Every structure is written in C-alpha cells, then in structure tokens.
Image: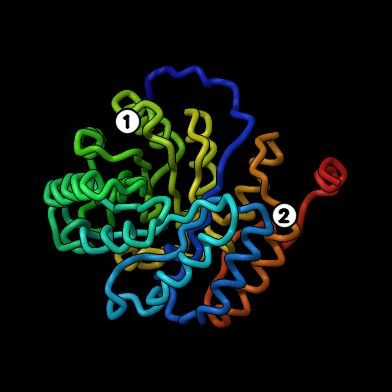
Amino acid sequence: MPNPPFSAPPLPRRAVIREMGLRDGLQSVATIVPTAAKLEWLRDAYDAGQREIEVGSFVPPKLLPQLADTAEVLAFAQTLPGLRATVLVPNMKGAQRAMDANAASMLLPLSASHAHSLANLRKAPDDVVAEIAQIRAERDARGSRTQIEVGMSTAFGCTIQGRVDADEVVRLVQAVLDAGVDCVGLADTVGYADPAMVSSLFEKVLRVAGDRLNCAHFHDTRGLGLANCYAALQMGITRFDASIGGIGGCPHAPGASGNVATEDIAYMLHSMGVATGQDFDQLLALRGKVGKWLAGEQLHGNVWRAGLPKTMKEQYA
Ligand code: ZN
C-alpha cells in the first residue's frame, strides 16, 4: 500500500541522541562489564557531549546480572550536571526503585505484539497498560518527578507473531496516554521496519500523540537503521535511541545486530547540519574502550572504519 502524500517539513536544527549502550546494549551480551568500567564509560560519554543516557534496568539481578549495579551507576550519573539518566523498568517494583532513586526518567517497555509481550513480560499488552496506570497513580501519590516514558516495542513487526497492525499500535499509544504517561517512542526491536513503514506509522501515531511521541528506537538488523532514523527525522522526530558501537539486540530476535550506532547517527545528523552536541573523536575513543571491555563480542557501525570525511573535518575544525 502506498503511503498517503506527505510534504516534509524542513529538517530540525537540533536533535538528541540518547545513549542506550549501558542497558539495551549490555543486556544482550554475555560479558559483565565491571561497575568501575561503566562509570568510566558514563564519564567519557558525558565528556563526548551525551546528555541523555539509559544507565541500566531495575530488574531482578538474577535475570540480568549484567545490570545488577544499576542503582550505583544511576547514582554516579546523577553527579554529572545536566545529564538526564533513564532507567528501564519492567513493572511497578522497578518503577518504585526508579522513583526511590529520583531517576529523571523511567522507560517502560510495552510490546505492540501480543506474543512478544507474553514472551518478554509474561503479560498481555492491556495488562501492561493497566500496570502503567498504577505506576502513574503511585507517582502522583508520592509527588515524584520521575518522568514516565513508554517504549512501544515490536511496533513494526515481531519475530514471534509476525505482523503487528498499525491500528493496534495506535490503540495502545492512546491507551498509555490515557493512563497518564508523559511521552512515548516507537521501537523497531527486531529490525523489520523500512523508511516507508516508519513514515506511515509515525504519521498515524503523531495524529493521536502529537509531540508526546518524541522518540525513535531502531535496530540495524537488516541495515536500515539510519534510513529509518532519517524517515523519522523527516516526520519531525528529534530524539533517537542509539548505542555506541551499535551494541545490543533482542533475546527474541535471533541474528539481530544491535541498535543504530551512536557514532553513525551522530555523523549523519552533523553532516546534514542537525546539531547533536556530540564530539566524534571522543565517541570513537569511547567506542575503542567499549570494544576492549566487551572483548570477544561483536561491535557494529561504519564510521569508525574510515573516520570522518576530510570535508567535515575542515567544517567542524
Ligand atoms: Zn533496542
């Protein structure tokens, strides 16, 4: 089906790249990075200009030993001025820990795919929505300022269920907005999206969510990660999840490569004149360190191989 006609607005002047390597990235690799290295990672990411970072996940340490030190990593992130730290929380218990720790933002995953939701959270999507409403009520009762963000995963399709209807994504976005969340993002957890699907689905969701739809989360499983980011950028989205070295994946998506690589999307946006505040050389230096901390694990991305084009080096010198 062709997409409805759409006239692209001018590209935004600024965009935010949220670093996901410390959670989305690390949760899908076997290596456990020591806490001291994570703090060095955070410090370097901050020095490279990153101001939104997902620092971990409040899940039981037994499930994800890689992220067992999330509270400590979050506490360090909170010492870096102007850094907005996000933690992933799968349920009320995790949300309470995030609010106890005064996290700036908690990211709640909600699968648009019924089958993925059961596999990942052992709950149907509407039961997750009901828990999200309880989390909002808990926040109100506490007077907490922790923002509630929903990441709508498998929004473009699912390795277990296959097709995911756009109407179902729209319905669930409306449901979580009604439940009182602050903002939502659309995630292609398994690398099924293409730019035309991105334009079409973001347009549909923007109709119900307006600027509360403010994040795009793409994996580069089939090489379309950056193209999908560009499609979302053209729809006016200015916040992109990415991970240094493209680390990450999904336990339910065999063969998945990771998130869009931070350094690649930073390069693309800068090349198009969209400011991100991130320093390439420092990002590449951090990528080198992450490669050492994750020795034996596969890193992804492209820009690191050849570095910046000569023209851009002159432009940003
Ligand atoms: Zn992801």
225 shown above or below 93: above
Q: Which residue is mark 2?
A: 280
Nearer to me, 136 or 302: 136
What x and y, as percent, mark residue 162? Answer: 24, 51
Q: Is residue 78 left or right of residue 309?
A: left
Alpha carbon separation for disc pair 2 and 1 = 33 Å
- Secondary structure state at the residue bearing disc 2: helix
Please, is residue 1 above or below residue 313 in the view? above
Mark 1 element type: helix
Ligand 1 closer than 8 Å to the CB at disc 1?
A: no
Q: Please tell me the numbered disc located at residue 84.
A: none
Q: Position of residue 226 (x, y in %)?
A: 55, 46
Q: Which mark is residue 205?
A: 1
Q: Residue at x 54, y 37 (%)?
A: 230
Q: Quadrant of residue 209?
A: top left
Q: Position of residue 147 (x, y in %)?
A: 36, 46
Tell me: residue 84, above or below residue 168: below
Whether residue 119 can be seen here: yes
For label 2, count other residues whose C-alpha is less than 10 Å away and answer few (under 14), some (14-19) or many (20+).
many
- Tell me which amino acid carries mark 2: Phe
Residue at 82% from the left image edge and 43% from the top image edge: 316
Label 2 CB sits under 8 Å from any ligand 1 atom: no
Task: Give the residue displayed 22% in from the left and 63% down from the top.
Answer: 93
Label 1 amino acid? Val
- The residue lying toward the viewer, choosing from 19 and 134, is 134
Query: Whole-percent x and y of residue 98?
Result: 33, 59
Quadrant including the N terminus = top left
> In the picture provided, is 153 more to the left or to the right than 309?
left
Q: Could you tell whether 299 is left or right of 232 in the image? A: right
The mark that comes first in sequence, 2 or 1, is 1
Name the residue located 71 percent from the left edge and 66 percent from the top edge. Answer: 285
Category of crowding for the residue at label 1, using alpha-carbon neighbours closer than 10 angstroms: few (below 14), some (14–19), many (at least 20): many
